[in-house]
Image (tube, coloured by chain):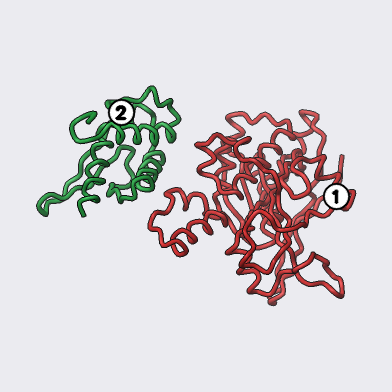
Chain colours: A red, B green
Amino acid sequence: MNRVVITGIGIVSPVGSNLDEFWTALVEGRSGIGPLTIIPTERLSTRVAAQVIGFDPDAHFQSKQAHLLDRFAQFAVFAARAAVRDAHCEISEELALDAATVIGSGGGGQSTMDAVYFKFYGQSSDKVHPLSIPRWMVNAAASQVSIDLGLRGPTWTVATACASGAHAIGQAFHMVRNGQAPMAVAGGTDACLTVGTIKAWEALRALSTDTCRPFSRNRSGLVLGEGAAMFVLEPRERALARRRSRHARCPAGCSSKPGRRRLRQCPWYGHDPQ
Amino acid sequence: MGDVGMTVEMLDEIKVIVSKRVEVPIEQLTNDTRLDDLGAESLDVIEIVYDIEEKFDIAVPITPGESSLLLETETQGAKSSVKLETIGDIARAVQSLVDAKSRR
């Protein structure tokens, strides 16, 4: 059994899209929730969301690659690149051959799906973009990350709602621990702020109209957000060999579902800087 | 007329669309430029067809899954497919589809 450590982290978030910015925001207790501005809201009652503002795909992708990427996959690829840079990990041909990509997503390419349905049903157009399916499949982010980084090992997606990312990291942890993969890029991504998706959440009577106050007596619901976080998981020995400081150690992982309608998670955990 | 079966404008429109998709400067494209030589992949081809359909509001009946364009045609009830290899081929085919549409 390998001991598994996290050597790289990459992030796209409403409070910052690099590790320092993100960490500072966490420490300062800054919220990423604000007025919903990236989509039209005339037909919605929701007015707040945690949006990633100012993410410019053109700054990160050639137009040919950008065509294949829904926003949720753009986030994933951006964060995965940052995680690998942060890990200072030279991915040799041999390492790449078995390196795993395990990415969680709750909703997949929601903006692509929304745009296609709007055009087809809303505007009665018969012309739908030919790359809609490769963009919106829920495994698109994992596939695009593996293509972008040249990782050729197991590449797959975990979809377990809000726990998708945590479960993906847990699965990657087990693969690296068991020696099934010599390294893994794992994490979660979602970009679900579309008119249709928010409308559906409103129908569930689950969304707050002001803000998110978990456990508070006067809580009013959840607030949707978007972003991605990716991690590089490696055996401790390799990290030590290149004297890479570790972000965290992953001692164990488990998950459970109590079989009732209310889901409770006991996800992977890990915390041990150095 | 720039060539038999198509207008200069049509050829230019097709060049614009192809140039954008395969990321080759428009000056390098001629009537005789072959899609294969531009390194167009199957996904590029379906995007080119999509752009053409959007631009001219026509349906282009192509055979899927090919890296070259196979246009499905029907003459006197007999179905066949024509291979469109060059930019000129595409322009001529689109011109005939556009003309057929305006005759309707």
- Spot occupied by residue A181 in the image (x, y as percentages of width and height): 63, 42
Q: Quadrant of the C terminus of chain B?
A: bottom left
Q: Residue furthest right?
A: A28
Mark 2, residue position: B34
Residue type marked 2: Arg
Same chain assignment for discs 1 and 2: no
Residue type marked 1: Leu
User: Which label is found at residue A26?
Assistant: 1
In front of the other: A100 or A210: A210
**Residue at horizontal 68 percent and vertical 45 percent from the top:** A176
**Residue A218 lies in quadrant:** bottom right
Q: CA distance from mark 1 to mark 2?
A: 55 Å
- Circle 1 packing at 10 Å, graded few (<14), some (14-19), many (20+), is some
Q: Quadrant of the N terminus of chain B?
A: top left
**Residue at horizontal 55 percent and vertical 52 percent from the top:** A139
- Spot occupied by residue B97 in the image (x, y as percentages of width and height): 24, 46
Q: In the image, A130: left or right of A22?
A: left
Q: Chain of mark 1?
A: A
Q: In the image, A202: left or right of A4?
A: left
From the image, state whether disc 1 or disc 2 is nearer to you.
2
- Spot occupied by residue B70 in the image (x, y as percentages of width and height): 26, 42
**Residue at horizontal 68 percent and vertical 75 percent from the top:** A205
Give SS at disc 1: helix
**Residue at horizontal 69 percent and vertical 44 percent from the top:** A54
User: Which label is found at residue A240?
Assistant: none
**Residue A226 lies in quadrant:** bottom right
In front of the other: A61 or A174: A61
